[in-house]
Amino acid sequence: MGRKKAPELYCQHCQQCHGAQAKAALGPSLTDAIWSLGNPTTLDLSKVIREGSPNKAMPAWGQILSTEEIETLANWLITGAAGPVQSSTIKNSAESETQI
């Protein structure tokens, strides 16, 4: 199994709570400047992905995703890649998975 790219990881593990465009659903938006962590670093975001946030219903992904996958997602989110300009990447990745 090859290394998954961030949009693929997002579609498989995150979009059910954060929405197909990462603009919020059950979980908060990941595309705006409002973060419950304030202004998180990649390390902060990796920790939340790995350990979860029980007070906010964020599950821990550390037993499911590898350290590399968590870091890939955190870097992608922190650099704004899930933002409006790149949101078509998320959608296209999800569509290609359903076509396989």
Image (cartoon, rainbow, N blue to C red):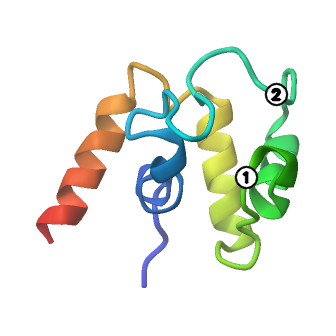
Residue at the image position 63 percent from the left and 32 percent from the top? 28
Q: Position of residue 96 (x, y in %)?
A: 19, 58
- Using residue 52 as the reference point, say whether residue 29 is left or right of it: left
Residue at the image position 63 percent from the left and 64 percent from the top? 69
- Using residue 25 as the reference point, say whether residue 79 is left or right of it: right
User: Residue pushed farthest bottom?
Assistant: 1
Q: Position of residue 57 (x, y in %)?
A: 74, 51
Q: Earlier in the sequence, mark 1 or mark 2?
A: 2
Q: Residue 56 or 93: which is nearer the viewer?
A: 56
Element on which disc 2 rests? loop
Are circles 1 and 2 on residues that touch, CB within 8 Å?
no
- Using residue 15 as the reference point, say whether residue 26 is left or right of it: right
Measure how far apart labels 1 and 2 are at the Cα level. 12 Å
Q: Which residue is mark 2?
A: 36
- Structural crowding at the residue carrying mark 2, measured as other residues with C-alpha within 10 Å and reported as few (<14), some (14–19) or many (≥20): few
In the rendered structure, which amino acid carries the disc numbered 2?
Ser
- Using residue 88 as the reference point, say whether residue 86 is left or right of it: right
Image quarter hosting the C terminus: bottom left
In the rendered structure, which amino acid carries the disc numbered 1?
Met
Res 58 label: 1
